[in-house]
Image (cartoon, helix red, strand yellow):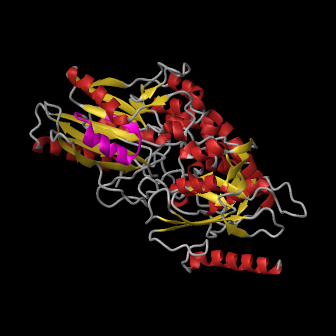
Amino acid sequence: MDILSTSWSAHLLFLLICIVSQCGADYQLTVLHTNDVHSRVEQFNKYGSECDPDEARDGECFGGAARRGTKVREIRESVPNVLLLDGGDQYQGTMWFFIYKGAAASHFMNMIGYDAMAIGNHEFDNEPEGLRPFLLNTTFPVLSCNIDASAEPSINGLFQKSVIRELSGERIGLIGYTYFKTHEISSSGECIFYPEIERIQIEVDAFRQAGINKIIAVGHSGIKTDLEIARMVEGVDVVIGGHTDTFLYTGDPPSSEIPYGDYPQVVNDQQGGGRALVVQDYTFGKYLGRLNITFNDEGEVIAYEGNPILMDSSIEQDQAILDEIEEWAGVVRNSSVMFVGISHAFLEGERTMCRARECNLGNLVSDAMVSQNNKNPDELRWNDVGIALMNAGSIRASISQGDITIGDIANVLPFGNTVDVLELRGIHLLEALENAVIMFDLDTLDGRFLQVAGLRVTYSLAREPGSRVVSAEAICTNCTVPHYEPLDVERVYKIVTNSFLAGGGDGYTVVRDNKMNHVTGNLDSAVFAEYIQRLTPVAPALEGRVIVLEEDVIDCTGLASRFTPSNVIVWTSLLAIISNRLSTL
C-alpha cells in the first residue's frame, strides 16, 4: 500500500471515531512518539547496524532521521493537533555518538520538529557535563520531574519538570520522568533521582489546579513502571514510555518483532475514575508510534486507536534532512570504515540474546579482556588473571558475518569504559554472580546479566533471588594447564572487568565496595579491536559458560547434576580435573 493511501486511511478512521463518539466539543489529538533511538541518525539494517549499499538497494533498511522526518511531516499535514514526543535515550549506540556526542541528536531532532523529550539514563553516559551541550542546543523542552540537579551546576536549570503545549486553543500538560535508579546504571554525578510516581503526581495536581485536564507523562523507566504510573497516578491520560525497548502492536505485526501486548495498553487507575493509555515504540526508531486520542470536555479519553508505523523503505527519506546527514556523515564514515578483521560467525549482541543467556559476542569480548591481561606466565602458572566479568548492558549491537570495521567495534562498545584489573574474594565474586540474575525477567531484560570468561555458572530461576547459583567453577591460574575448579569462597581471585561494573554500575556494589588492588586499564573498544586484529578470522561459539535453568536442580558435586548436551562441556571439565589430580598422586 502506498504512503498516501496509508495516511488517508488512518485519517478517515480517526474521523469515523470522532463521528461515532458524537464529537462536537470533543477534542482530537495525535501523539507521535519515539524512544531509545540510540544515535541511529542514518538508516540501519535489521540488526540495528549500518545499512550497506546492497541492503539499501534491496529495501532492507529501516528508520533514520530523514525517513522519520518524512512521516512526521505527512501526518502533520493531514491532521490537526499533532505532538511529537521522545521517551529518552537519544544518546549512545553508534559512531555518530562516538564522534558527535549529543550534537547530532539535538540537531536532527530540531530539524524534525520534536515538541518535547524525556531524559533517559544514557543521556548521562558522559556525565552531566556531557548532557549540557544537548540541553543548550535543543529548540524543544527536555523534561524530567524526578531529577534534582541542584548539585550539578552544569545542567541545573537547563531542563524542566513539565511544560504546557497549546494546540487549537486546548492546553496539554506534558510531564517528563527518568528511571529512578539511573545513578546505578549511568554516570549521573551528584544528581538525585526520586521515585517516579510521587513526583509525577505533584505535576499532575498542579496542572489540574490550573484547569488543564489533558495530561501526558513521557519518560524512561520501563514498561512495568509505565503501567504502574498509569494505574497509580490520578489524572494522567497517556504514558509514553521507554527504556525496555518494548514493542506493542495490535494485529499482525509488520516485521520480525513479537509484540509484548496490544497498542495501546489500557489501564484503569486505582481510584476507578478514569483510564490511561500506555505506549512504547520499540527501539532505534525502527517504528514511529502513532496514537490518535479523542477527549471529551472533561478531559477523559473516550476513544483511541493507533499502532506503530514501520519505518521501512516504502517511506521516502526527507531530502533536506538527508542532505544535512550527508554533510555530517563524512567524519563518521571516514572513521568507521577502517578494517579491523573478519568474523566467520554472526556475532550476536542483541539484548534478547546477551541479557538472557550466554552469547558468542559476549564470549569474544570477555576473552579479549582476559587476553589483554595475559602477561604474567611463569613455571607455576599460565597467567595471573583468568576471569572476566562483563555486564551484558555494555554490549549494544550485533556484528554480521564478514568484515569487521572500527565502526562495528564502536557500535558494540560505545561507552568508553576501560578494562580494569582488580582482586575480589570468592564470597564476593559469588555475590556478584547472584546479582547477575537477581532481577532476571525476559520482559525487561536487565543489563546486569553477566557475560563471562574463565567461569562456568549454572543458575536455577526456581530458587529465590540471591540464591540462584546452583554451581560455579572458576578457571585456575596457579596452574600450567588451565582447568576449572569449584569456586572457593575463601580464595582471592584476580579478575578483569569494565570500569562501569568496577564502579558499582548495574547494582554491582559488591564489586565496588570489596575490590582490592584496582588498576585502570585501556579503553575497552581498543582492547577488543586489537584482539580481533590479532586473531582474525574469529568464529566464537557458545560454550556452556552460563546456563540458566527454569527448574531447580541438585548440586551434589559442585556442578549441576543435569547431564544434557548443554552441560557436556561441564562434565568434560570434571573428568579433566579428576585426571589432573590423579596425575599428582
Q: Which residues are magenta?
A: 217-235
The quarter of the displayed image where residue 458 is located: bottom right
Q: Say whether residue 234 is magenta.
A: yes
Which image quarter is the C terminus in? bottom right
225 or 275, which lies in front?
Answer: 225
Residue 479 on image: x %, y %: 81, 66
489 or 162, which lies in front?
Answer: 489
Q: Say whether residue 186 is magenta.
A: no
Which image quarter is the N terminus in? bottom left
Residue 187 on image: x %, y %: 57, 35
206 or 539, which lies in front?
Answer: 206
Residue 149 on image: x %, y %: 49, 24
At 46% from the left and 53% from the top, the residue drawn is 439
Horizontal side of 494 relative to 97 (left or right) equals right
Horizontal side of 64 relative to 166 (left or right) equals right
437 or 467, which lies in front?
Answer: 467
